Image (cartoon, rainbow, N blue to C red):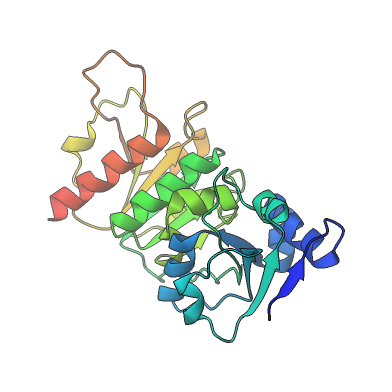
Amino acid sequence: MPEILSSLHNPRYKQLKKLAESAATRRELGQTLLDGEHLLAAALDAGIQPRLLLTPLDAPRHALLARCPAVEQLELAPALFNALSPVKTPTGVLALIDIPAAVPPASPLFCVLLEAIQDPGNLGTMLRSAAAAGVDAVYLSPQCADAWSPRVLRAGMGAHFVMPIVEHADLCALARDFAGAVCAAELGAAQSLFQTDLHGAVAFAVGNEGAGLSAELCAAASVQFSIPMPGQVESLNAAAALAVCLFERVRQKG
């Protein structure tokens, strides 16, 4: 029978709460919590077995649990379970996993450099778009949100398990060493994205909506381009801008 946790003061529960809320704890332990069936299925499909499975007390048994017969299970009082989940209506399963090591290709042909993307929803959406476009690796500057936070994981929809995500990367050094075109999205750049040759090795550099890219990363880029916007808005959301860039490369290669 699974162990039952019903107290906020239980040491195991306190540790799980820290993992749910603290990037420093996730980094220290090299672990994170997956919320929901979709993320657990994506992890299992990638060959990742959880350390621990959590379900609400007396909830119906999830079919996915049959794929983890040797994994310890805990049942939590519903209020405790809901407090661990990042959403208002949890789907009824949480999984504790070891964060997989990020091992990017030695010579990536298609990668993304993300600088100071601080909104978790935006970051997760960008990772999802990158995975869908077939990106080899994503590199995050130290100012980015924690890639393995519950909110980023939910927005990523499994992207974390199909490509390497390298955190705390030196983006300027990567840009200087990249054996291809480093393309920086910049408002007002004379060259259009749609005029840019994206057939070879390509790295897209994207900054946050408020500050854009740093002067240093812009200087390290070999190509600066803008996305044509005939409508009456000043700029695109950073996640939307990256998706446009990624799938223009897919279109050109297709």
Image point (65%, 66%), residue name: 31
Res. 212 in view = yes
Residue 208 pos. (x, y %)? 49, 34
| Position of residue 96 in the picture relative to residue 63 (left or right) | right
Residue sitting nearer the eye, 235 or 156: 156
Residue 156 pos. (x, y %)? 44, 52
| Position of residue 150 in the picture relative to residue 215 (left or right) | right
Image point (24%, 16%), residue name: 231
Relative to residue 57, is residue 236 depicted above or below? above
User: Residue furthest toward the top?
Assistant: 232
Which image quadrant: the C terminus? bottom left
Residue sitting nearer the eye, 212 or 8: 8
| Position of residue 153 in the picture relative to residue 203 (left or right) | right
Relative to residue 17, is residue 246 depicted above or below? above
Residue 15 pos. (x, y %)? 78, 62
Count all numbered tags in the image, as a single digit. 0
Image point (47%, 40%), residue name: 122
Q: Quadrant of residue 199?
A: bottom left
Residue 103 pos. (x, y %)? 48, 71
| Position of residue 168 in the picture relative to residue 153 (left or right) | right
Residue sitting nearer the eye, 184 or 49: 49
Relative to residue 226, is residue 97 depicted above or below? below
Relative to residue 61, is residue 22 depicted above or below? above
Q: Quadrant of residue 138?
A: bottom left
User: Residue furthest toward the bottom?
Assistant: 70
Which image quadrant: the N terminus? bottom right
Res. 113 in view = no
